[in-house]
Structure formats: C-alpha cells, structure tokens
Image: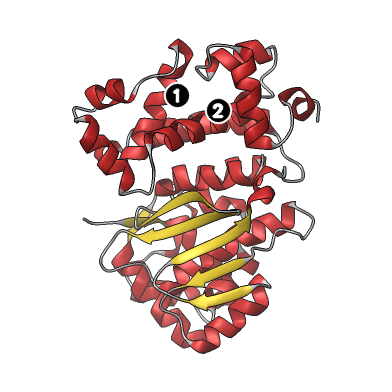
Amino acid sequence: MTTSTAASYLRPLLRLLNQRGHDGAALFARHGIDAQLLAQPDARLPVAVTRDLMAEAERLTGETALGLALVRHVEYSTFGSLGLVLAAGGSMRGVLERISRYHALVSDSVALRIVEEGDALVLHIDERSQPAPHPQSILFLLATVVGLGRLRLGGTGSPDRVQLKGVDAACLADARRFFRCEVQSGAHWRIELPLRAGNVMLDGSDPEMAALLEQTLRSRLDAGGSAQKLSLKLALWLEEKLPDGEPALAQAAQAFALSERSLQRRLAEEDLTWSRLLDSTRRALAERHLHTPGMSLTQLAFLLGFSDVSSFSRAFRKWFGEPASRLRGR
C-alpha cells in the first residue's frame, strides 16, 4: 500500500530549518520536494520521501527530539481542513475522536484509536505502512495533541503517561521534560489522559462552527472509499441510520456484506465491539448537535436513535457527567 502525507504537514519543518540558518527549500529539493507545494492544501507526498527528509533534517539540526522542536512552529493550517475543526474545539474527548476519525486527510500512514482503559482515556497511534513514518514525525503528532490541550485548557492538558517507540535515551529525556509525566520506551505509541479530562471543554470552543466544518471533512473522507477503516465506515453508516432507531448488528453486517461474526472480528481487530462503536458514535453526535439552534433535547434524543428521552438523558449523564440541559447552557 502506497501511503502519503499532506504536504502542509511539513511546514513546521521548513520554518525550523530556516530559523536555524539552513536552506530549507534546498534540503526539500534534494528529496524531490518543491517547497511551494507546502502551500497547496491538497498536495500530498509519499511517506517514504517524508521519512528520508525527516531523517536528514534530524542529522542536520542535531535535534535529539526533532518532533518536539517542530511543535513551536505548528499552526492550525498545518492540518489543512482538519485544523479548522480542531480550532473550533469542543470537549477534549470530542477533539481526540475527531483527530482519530479524520486524520487520514493528513496522513494515511498511521491509524489513531481512542479507547477507555480503566480510568484512562488512551490515544493509540498504529503504523499502517512500510516503511513506517519517521519516529520524529509521530512524536510531532503526539506533542501537537498535548500542546493543543495545554493551550486550550489553561495549561492543564498534560497526560498521565506517554509511551514512545523507536527513540533513543536522549529523546526520552527531552520528552519527559515536554510531556511533564512518565514517559517510557515501548512497542507502541500512546498517550494516557485522565478519563475525566475527556469531558472538559477547550477554551474558546465554537460547537456550531465545529459541526458545520465537520460536514466538509465527512465529504472529503467519503471519497476515500476502500482505504477507510471499517469502524469509520460503520460510524458514518450509523449516523445515517440512527434517526430511524437503533440499528441491529445484523443490519450492519448485511449492509456491509459480512456475516455477524466477521463484522465482530473486524471490529475486534480495531479494539472495538459493536456496542462500544454504537456508544461512541452517539456520544460524538450528541456533542456535535447539542448546540444546534432550534433543536430540542427530545429531537436530539431521537436523532441519536433512543426510543425515549429518559434513555438519552441517562446516556448523556454517563458520557459527560452532567445533564444535557446544564451543558447546553454554557
């Protein structure tokens, strides 16, 4: 599988190189990249090329944790249209789920998963390509997520634990200073946040704008076709079906030409179950539409496929820790 990364993702690297007195455009050119591509929102580059570029930049700058240094040069536009939705904010969990769902628009070389593990909300990053992205590229992504949380949560968005893959001791030491928590080397990339932190709303959030912009992302991602994860396809399918009532697993299996057992197995490969996917899809929809003008809580309950408002209210309190009426008033 040939994987690619949005050219805009390399803008921070070009800025850092130029700031350090290097000719960034010349370095990019040596790897066959016209630096002007970075300004084109739909331009993409093969991951094999970006990996080699990142490796040379790491050697040239002498940065032991280049991915962390790049965070100082990041802008929302680095992530294209996904960046606009991130800027619109929402709850920390909602933002993480949005990153997970739409990250393929930035790069399809990794897959992001959000799962609950005990009292932790965990972001996993799984490599999907060979060659895999350069470790500093994935570190840059992790650091950007944490940096966004700190910026929009008044400096309180640090994780509890971080695991990095394929980095040396010097990079780990730098990462401990940046993340301000336990950082270990391991077989996976992951960030653990307190579960309660998922419900905290980012400062300056505009849920209505986020909901509008998300429709643009959905349209763009729909064009991805077979490259999408099954869980994402199912989530989009659920969003369409929920207003008619809660769909059964058998309906989903039939819609995707799979047996129920095969569908469950495919979800298990993504550390999901049908019930967890249904619950997370409803939760994302609730956050997206909670502030829609003119939508009553009764209408929202039925939009999410609940048979009555009381069932919706119980689910909402479980998701966000307070009644929908209170959260809506903020």
Residue 169 seen in render: yes
Element type at mark 2: helix
Q: Tell whether 276 sits left or right of 285.
A: left
The residue drawn where x is 45% and y is 18% is 242
- Quadrant (top left/top right/bottom left/bottom right) for the N terminus: bottom left
The image position of residue 285, as x and y in percent, is 55, 28
- Name above or below for residue 40 compared with residue 255: below
Badge 1 amino acid: Glu
Q: Residue 328 or 222: which is nearer the viewer?
A: 328
The image position of residue 119, as x and y in percent, is 61, 53
Residue 239: image tag: 1
The residue drawn where x is 32% and y is 46% is 268
The image position of residue 223, as x and y in percent, is 33, 34
Residue 296 found in image quarter? top right
Count neighbours of disc 2 (C-alpha within 10 A) and say few if under 14, some if 14 to 19, many if 20 or more. Answer: some
Badge 2 amino acid: Leu
- The answer for how far apart the CA atoms under marks 2 and 1 are is 8 Å
Element type at mark 1: helix
The residue drawn where x is 34% and y is 75% is 52
The residue drawn where x is 55% and y is 33% is 284
Count neighbours of disc 1 (C-alpha within 10 A) and say few if under 14, some if 14 to 19, many if 20 or more. Answer: some
Q: Residue 274 or 20: which is nearer the viewer?
A: 274
- Name above or below for residue 154 compared with residue 186: above
The image position of residue 179, as x and y in percent, is 64, 71
Residue 285: image tag: 2
